[in-house]
Image (cartoon, helix red, strand yellow):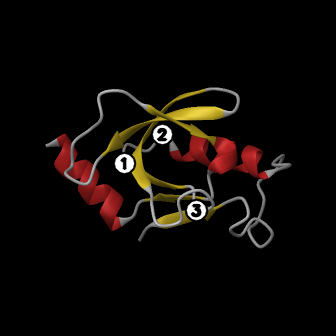
Amino acid sequence: MGGTQRLGRCGLSHAPTLPGAADASSLARTAVRSASPTPAAHAFHEENRAPDSCWVGRPVGYRAKSFGVLKVDPEARWAQTPSAFRFKHLTRIGFGGHYERTLAEFASG
């Protein structure tokens, strides 16, 4: 079973907030960092900016307002360099799902 953490305008008012999470960016930062130690890929959603898209990859490196994602494409190829994501744009983070696990497994092998 996969887990999904909803953030920002897409459910923040109904989602439980983490201790110390004063706004959506803070909640997103906490969620990404807590999911990062797992070796599986995660699905990152920016539904307010790209409602029909998600990016699958592993978080790598953090800054105050953004983090890097080493993405894997639909053909199961890992990117050579990370892409930057801003915490304030995240609306959902999926992890442990079948799609993310399968894509990462095929990309690794």
Mark 3 neighbour density, 10 Å: few (under 14) some (14–19) many (20 or more): some
Q: Which mark is residue 40?
A: 1
Which amino acid type corresponds to the residue marked 2 in the rendered image? Pro
- Specify whether 23 is left or right of 25: right
Examine the rendered structure and indicate whether residue 61 appears above or below residue 98. above
Instruction: Identify the residue shown where x is 73% and y is 50%.
Output: 27
Q: Split into 4 quadrants, where in the image is the C terminus?
A: top left
Q: Where residue 47 is drawn, which disc sits there?
A: 3
Mark in front: 3 vs 1? 3
Residue 73 screen position, x and y as percent: 28, 48
* Residue carrying label 2: 37
Q: Residue at horizontal 41%, vertical 71%?
A: 1
Q: Answer left or right for 90 relative to 22.
A: left
Please name the residue shown 65% across and 49% down the image: 89
Mark toward the start of the polypeptide (3 vs 1)? 1
**What amino acid is at disc 3?**
Glu
Between the C-alphas of marks 3 and 1, the distance is 22 Å
The mark nearer the N terminus, 2 or 3, is 2
